Image (cartoon, grey):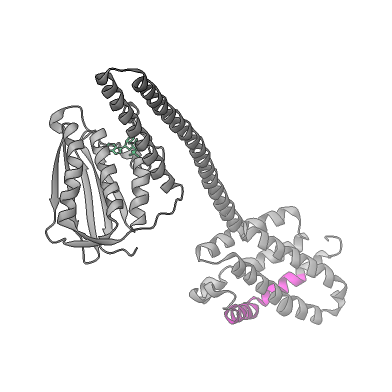
Amino acid sequence: MRASLSAEAARQLAEYLLEHLIPIRSQVLAEIRAHSDEIPTARSLSDEALLDHLPQLFVDLGKYLLSGADPQMRAIILDTARKHGETRASQGYQLTELIREIGIVHSLIVDYGLEPFLLARPDLADSADGFSKVIGTFFEDSVVGSIQRYVDKFNDEARQANEKLRAANQRLSELDAFRLQLVRTFHHELGNALNALNFSIEFVTQTPDASTQREMLGACRRSVREMAALLTQLDDYALLLGREAPVQSETIDVAQFARELEVSLLAMIRDAGMSLEMQVDPKLHVIQSDRARIKQIVNNLVTNAIKYRKPQPSEGRMVIQVRSLSAESWELSVEDFGIGIPQEHLESIFNEFQRFPPSEQIAGRGLGLAITKHLVEELKGVIKVTSEVDQGTRFVVTLPKQIGS
Ligand code: ADP
């Protein structure tokens, strides 16, 4: 390329271009404005902001021509163009807009710079191809340099997306392992209960002693209850895995429902040496929702309030509050004064199989809150939690007053 361009011819073209900077600049402005459908961001830029890089570009192009596009000069152009790309990116240009704009500048320099120059200098006609090539390379380098900022951004986004995908994959593998473990545990526990049941039945049929028979029948009943509880847990978990169960919406008298809930929970709460304070907003009369699901939500939250209580009996209070929020929504909260949850775990508390110290010493599978959240979402509500270690935990469920079935 260098050989095909005489230094003198290149110098003359560079001078010509610089002398015609102002008219070419006006053409560039008009052309960019005329292409505002392709470069819409340019509409928000002043003429000055659109054109302020052109004088430097003309000087650089001149040097580029003189150097015959030598590697050192190309490196300088790449760097200048990179800065230009950063400016345009910060002005909100999309990549296609930037490339289109560079294309416009390129073709106008050819149409209003190179071509009139060659017309005026027929003696340099032999250099025409060489000039075109060098100008073409200059603008290729300009494109390569100015899109760098966009390429970096794409790479960055791709890296972040990959990172998220990797984390999601890892979570899925963990879930898979947990689920396998869950199947094994259920199998084991059902097997135990079944063995115990078999053993008790054998014993009942073999012993003539009526009191031993009664005792064994009691054991049979316990095994059957255990198996039924395991089946209920499996059924709840199936909900999370996508089992479809239609929402059953009905009119619920809130005060009466709260009393029912209280009665059904009291035995369990008292057994744990705890007490319940039920606060019902008298302004909340009826709601249209799924009674069984709400019951299960409260049950799960109360079970946790019991499980994660402090060892001292004096701390065994819990408060269930039901109140109207607006014409459309109501709120149900369960507050305890138990061991609390460290802040760093609050976000992941609703994920499947998430349990945090010291809960390892307390029976559980880390599924209750995931199921609760799922139930709340089926009722078109949201669940939030606030907690402080050693102070207690409050779960707040916000629900619509009316949901369709
Ligand atoms: P599980 O109780 O079977 O572990 P959950 O999904 O119901 O499963 O709860 C997940 C974890 O959240 C528990 O292991 C415990 O660490 C924490 N947690 C839930 N509720 C409470 C609460 N009321 N007080 C303190 N920690 C709680």
Query: What residue is at 23 percent from the left and 55 percent from the top?
Result: 331
Quarter of the image for residue 135 reads bottom right
Is residue 26 found inside the magenta-colored segment of the image? Answer: yes
How many labels sit on residues?
0
The correct choice, above or below, for 322 with respect to 173 in the image is below
State the predominant SS element of the stretch in magenta.
helix
Query: What residue is at 33 percent from the left and 47 percent from the top?
Result: 372
> In this image, 336 relative to 381: left or right?
left
Residue 350, visible in the rendered structure = no
Where does the image place residue 326, in percent across and percent down from the top left?
Answer: 21, 64
Q: Which segment did they paint magenta?
A: 12-35
Quarter of the image for residue 112 reads bottom right
Quarter of the image for residue 4 reads bottom right
> In this image, 233 relative to 20: left or right?
left
Is residue 15 found inside the magenta-colored segment of the image? Answer: yes
**Which of the two residues, 27 or 398, is positioned nearer the viewer here?**
398
Where does the image place residue 129, in percent across and percent down from the top left?
Answer: 84, 70
**Which of the two residues, 335 or 37, is positioned nearer the viewer here?**
335
Where does the image place residue 16, in percent across and percent down from the top left?
Answer: 72, 75
The correct choice, above or below, for 100 with respect to 357 in the image is below
> In this image, 119 relative to 390: left or right?
right
